Image (cartoon, rainbow, N blue to C red):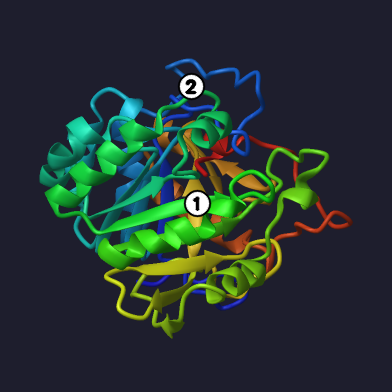
Amino acid sequence: MELTDTFGRTINYLRLSVTDRCNMRCVYCMPAEGLPLRSHREILSYEDLLSIARTAVSLGIEKIRVTGGEPLVRKGILGFLAQLAETPGLRQLVLTTNALHLAEMAESLKFAGVQRLNISLDSLKPATFSAITRGADVSRVMAGIDAAERAGFPLKINMVVMNGINDDEILDFVAMTMDRAVTVRFIEYMPAIKATDWESRVVPGDTILERIAERFSFKSEARESLAGPARIFSVDGAAGTFGIISPVTGHFCEECNRIRVTAAGRARSCLFSDREVDLKPFLAIGDDRALAAALRQVVTFKPRRHLLTEAEQQFTPFAMAALGG
């Protein structure tokens, strides 16, 4: 079975948030005062999350990325992941994490059936990292990356590039790929919380490539199956690769293959669209057919492209943690 939207795009990727709680407070993800946390009653149970996942896979979803907030702060996450990994027809199970708990959990995650990890890391400098995350310790993240490598995980390391904040570290991140078989992905800053000066923070993807070219010789690489929108490159002789994700300056919407479900059970077809479907009523009555119909409806809502330029912005500001960024 295959899910196809009204523009002919095949939808085979679900981002499934398990919590809106996070042990970081990144400046691009949430306001300084943090977020009003939902009660436990408002957050989907693991049973409901599994129902959504299994129904989605039965419709044609092949890849599930578990997100948050920070998924590793939710109690019982390992058991849930082990059950999720056993879903018939699921080809790829990935988890996104800030890695603060990864050093002690990497082996268990591998045993549970997680196949790949995406790790958020926006600076290698302790002071800069602490400023971006409002207090986190980069050494804990690096320890988590080391543990994940020892456990045998393929790793993607995501860096949100912000002008005047961490863009001076682009070449340092590329250098990581020389000796480590990781993929570093440079992501343009997105105006999710609509900060008044957001445009000044954006470093265009092409500018990032130009800076890298001043130091390194690199070539384009093919994207793997079920991959996201990154353009992938490798430096000559490097063990790993790097990618560019350009949501602001380079619309990749024509290739978008994803939908997302928040920890509160609201399904969206686009991060920057306010149109969503509440799945809780169908979960409450255990109606799998109605749940499947709701997910199909979400796919029909998928817009041709997002509207991120200042004149076109038509979404309500949000915190990434609340929507499963």
Q: 320 above or below 307?
A: above
Q: Nearer the viewer, residue 77 or 249?
A: 249
Residue 159, which numbered label?
1
Q: For this view, does 39 lie left or right of residue 203?
A: left
Residue 42, which numbered label?
2
Q: For this view, does 243 lie left or right of residue 226?
A: right
Residue 254 visible to the viewer = yes
Q: 256 above or below 17?
A: below
At mark 2, the secondary structure is loop
Residue sitting at x 51%, y 29%:
130
Residue 132, which numbered label?
none
Residue sitting at x 67%, y 51%:
272
- The three-letter amino acid code for the residue at tag 1 is Met
Q: Residue furthest left?
A: 111
Q: For this view, does 226 lie left or right of residue 167?
A: left
The image position of residue 48, as x and y in percent, is 35, 35
Instruction: Report how far apart the C-alphas of labels 1 and 2 lie in the structure.
Output: 31 Å
The image position of residue 59, as x and y in percent, is 37, 62
Residue sitting at x 47%, y 39%:
125
Local crowd size for mark 1, using a 10 Å CA cut-off: few (<14), some (14–19), many (≥20): many
The image position of residue 259, as x and y in percent, is 50, 55
- The three-letter amino acid code for the residue at tag 2 is Glu
Residue 183 visible to the viewer = no
Residue sitting at x 52%, y 19%:
38
Q: Nearer the viewer, residue 157 or 168?
A: 168
Q: 146 above or below 243?
A: above
At mark 1, the secondary structure is strand
Lower position in the chain sequence, tag 1 or tag 2: 2
- Residue 225 figure quarter: bottom left
Local crowd size for mark 2, using a 10 Å CA cut-off: few (<14), some (14–19), many (≥20): few
The image position of residue 274, as x and y in percent, is 69, 45
